[in-house]
Image (cartoon, rainbow, N blue to C red):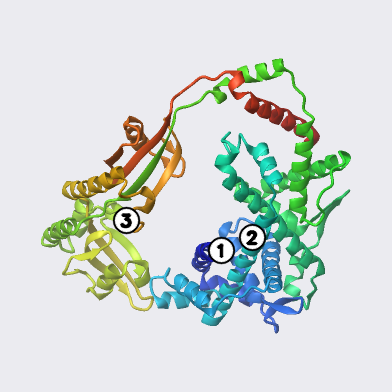
Amino acid sequence: MAIRKFRQKMKVITLVITVAFVLSSAALYIMNQMNYATTKNYALKVNGNEVKIENVMRSKNMLANNFKNNVDEDIVGVLALDQVIENELAQELADSLKIRISSKDVNNEYKNIEANFKDKEQFKRMLTAQGYTKASLKKELEKSMRSMKAREVIGEEAKSSITEEEIEKYYEENKYSIFQGLPLVDVKEKVEQYLVQEKATMLFDKEIKKLREKMTLSDVNDQFTKYLEKPQIEKEDLKITNVDYSKIYITFISSGLDKEKAKEETDKFIESQMKILKSAKENGIEVDKDLSISLQIKDAYEKLYNKIESQIEYKDEDLKKFFDENKQFYNIQPSADAYIAYFKVKPSDADKKASEEKAKDILAIVNKDNFASIAKEKSECPSSVNGGDLGWFTKEDMVKEFSDAAFKGNVGEVYPEVVNTVFGSHIIFVQEKNEKDKTVRASHILVKSNVSPETIAEKLKEEELEADKLSKGEETFENLPKDKFTDSSLFTSITEQGYIPGLGYKEELVKEIYKAPLNKVVVKNIDGEIYVFQKIKEIQRKEVSLDEVKDQVIKDYKTQKTVEKIQNILK
């Protein structure tokens, strides 16, 4: 089980590294390398281990691109250097846990990343742009996999330490928020998952903090000295470093604020956290000093919140007034639970052939002089408004079949054959070529391979047979073929307004679900998607009395009063 979870998580590493490649460019990388030219090829040493300059620059480039260069360079530099230092410490943690990653697993992840690129040449260019060789990328992958595995091992340790008392306490605190008032027996597994995640985060944070306190940074390249962690704000018991400040600041930038507003909100936020820590201390609350400052503040807030909440008193008339003012939130709203499986219908071979024949008819009448006017009239591509003009592009910019034809075709001529791709059938007019830049300028007319009513009818017939098996219990939704269905799951709390948690708004589908008899397996075509569903539960609208929801009302009343008291602390 642990191995399977670990390998599933590796998909995240593959995606992150692939995105990092795409975000960067050779020009940016070379320019930064020139700016940091030095006789040393490392930025600093962490406990004697060299951290290469390109590792810091790679991290810096990715952060800068993520925030569209809307963040001051110094803040990006502080975060980037901190990130690579933490990565080094995570390797030391992995060493202490005796974590090893097989070369087979590393090679598999390398191949997964390579497969995300159109061809090996493009992949090699991206490697060069990022300052990687094949060997150094594999080493980086191994480090990422070891860090991921270290977190998982710590997660297993957290899981083994959780007690029944902790589970019950966490459930009661979050019964009507996270767990929607469901009985503990129904959500116990989910409660454990949340607890494990919280505990694992805290344990990992503590281990990294211990390593930070003992680490030695030496031989720091002068260019990176200004990015080292140092105190930025020291007031009373709170010490905020430039790293802490930058992490808070970046969250406000992420929310869309400009630099000045983000700084203003960061300063306000830090001031409020100081008040929380001060109030926690005044209330005799002990904060776990082994945590990083961000988690210390979180720990202080949660303990302060719980203490204040435990002191809230109420009378029956308080609850009655609160309930009457908020009755609409307690009334039971209509909802449904249903198994839903679905897939997008793809054009059949006959559909593709039909689009190709239509494209051939256009090819027979088109020439370089009338190409633009016919493209405006008949092309199904957004470029039709420009007469089909796609502008200049490289071979890698287009799908292979299209690029091969465009680069093979003669300038000033319409390519003599219809070109079929995943998008449909194309007629291509090669306008210009730049041999030096290896680019082509071309226009095209696209005839999409649209799904015909006959194909839809055929697929509906197939799924009616599938529905019959589901109805008879010969098949289950969980076991429907994954290579065919986009999803096949139980979806709960489907609202009458058309919202399906996990799928979004699907008004027409929800109407069909609410209309369907309970437990009947239904097949529907909605806008070219085939849905197979079975409603297994439906809750009708109902007005409730205070007695029916008294426990929840008490919890909500105490929550409101607690929040009001905390807001007063923050004033």
Local secondary structure at mark 3: loop
Q: What residue is pinned by disc 2?
A: 156
Residue 93 vertical placement versus 517 (above, below): below
Question: Which mark is first along the chain, 2 or 3?
Answer: 2
Local secondary structure at mark 1: helix
Which quadrant of the rendered structure holds the C terminus?
top right
Classify mark 1: residues with Cα within 10 Å, few (<14), some (14-19) or many (20+): few
Q: Assess whether mark 2 and mark 1 are in contact (beta carbons under 8 angstroms).
A: yes
Residue 382 vertical placement versus 92 (above, below): above
Q: Position of residue 2 (x, y in %)?
A: 56, 63
Number of marks present in the image shown: 3
Classify mark 3: residues with Cα within 10 Å, few (<14), some (14-19) or many (20+): few
Residue 46 vertical placement versus 286 (above, below): below
From the viewer's side, name the closer residue of 224 and 340: 340
Q: Dividing the picture into quarters, in which one does residue 407 lie?
A: bottom left
Question: Which mark is first along the chain, 3 or 1?
Answer: 1
Classify mark 2: residues with Cα within 10 Å, few (<14), some (14-19) or many (20+): some
Residue 448 falls left or right of residue 156 = left
Whole-angstrom CA distance, mark 1 to mark 3, is 27 Å
Checking the image for residue 484, the label placed there is 3
Can you tell which of label 3 and label 2 is closer to the viewer?
2
From the viewer's side, name the closer residue of 289 and 120: 289
Whole-angstrom CA distance, mark 1 to mark 2, is 9 Å
Q: What residue is pinned by disc 1?
A: 2
